[in-house]
Image: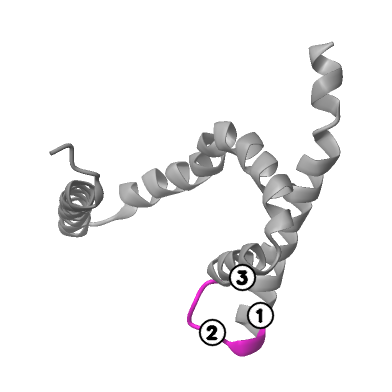
């Protein structure tokens, strides 16, 4: 019974996945056509935000697709991490040290900004 209920969502989820892929491809095509300094997937994301603003009905399939992809996010990052480790092995020691320092500083800055925004935007219980 539970499996039968999930089957009704499958076509909508596939529609959301196709929409995401089409927007990413459109963003890539637009970036190449315009020789834009912005990566194609970022332009695709901007088109997605515009689509959501103009067509609220797209939220359902996109939400189903997002919930389906979220548990698999680590699989998307894994090839990038493997390549990064391979590149780090070839870096001179000074460059690697600067890269690690930059990553630590940016992580710390992100944490501080997030904490400040959370403190400022959270409702107060006075």
Kind of element beneath mark 3 = helix
Q: According to the image, label 2 marks what residue?
A: 36
Q: Please say if the residues under marks 2 and 3 sit with CB atoms less than 8 Å apart.
A: no
Q: Quadrant of residue 52?
A: bottom right
Mark 3 surroundings: few (<14), some (14-19) or many (≥20) residues within 10 A:
few
Left or right relative to 67: residue 115: left
Q: Residue at x 56, y 42 (%)?
A: 76
Residue 107 to residue 11: above or below: below
42 magenta-colored: no
36 magenta-colored: yes
In x, y percent, where is residue 84?
Answer: 40, 49
Q: Is residue 31 visible?
A: yes
In x, y percent, where is residue 11?
Answer: 85, 40
Q: According to the image, label 3 marks what residue?
A: 50
Mark 1 surroundings: few (<14), some (14-19) or many (≥20) residues within 10 A:
some
Q: According to the image, label 1 marks what residue?
A: 30
Task: Measure the alpha-carbon separation of dots 3 and 1.
Answer: 15 Å
Give the mark toward the camera: 2 or 3: 3
Q: Which of 21 and 96 lies nearest the eye of the viewer? A: 21
Give the mark nearer the N terminus: 2 vs 3.
Answer: 2
Q: Which of 13 and 86 lies nearest the eye of the viewer? A: 13
Q: Quadrant of the N terminus?
A: top right
Mark 2 surroundings: few (<14), some (14-19) or many (≥20) residues within 10 A:
few
Task: Measure the alpha-carbon separation of dots 1 and 2.
Answer: 8 Å
Task: Measure the alpha-carbon separation of dots 2 and 3.
Answer: 19 Å
Q: Please say if the residues under marks 1 and 2 sit with CB atoms less than 8 Å apart.
A: yes
Q: How is the image coloured?
A: one colour
Give the mark nearer the N terminus: 3 vs 1.
Answer: 1
- What segment is highlighted magenta in the picture? 33-39
Give the mark toward the camera: 3 or 1: 3
């Amino acid at each position: 019974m539970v499996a039968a209920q999930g089957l009704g969502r499958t076509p909508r989820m596939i529609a959301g996945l196709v929409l995401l892929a089409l927007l990413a491809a459109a963003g890539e095509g637009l970036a190449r056509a315009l020789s834009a300094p912005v990566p194609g997937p970022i332009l695709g994301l901007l088109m997605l935000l515009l689509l959501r603003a103009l067509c609220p009905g797209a939220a359902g399939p996109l939400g189903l697709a997002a919930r389906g992809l979220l548990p698999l996010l680590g699989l998307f990052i894994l090839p990038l991490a493997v390549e990064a480790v391979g590149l780090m092995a070839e870096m001179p020691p000074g460059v690697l040290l600067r890269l690690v320092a930059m990553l630590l500083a940016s992580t710390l800055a992100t944490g501080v900004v997030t904490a400040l925004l959370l403190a400022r935007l959270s409702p107060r219980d006075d």
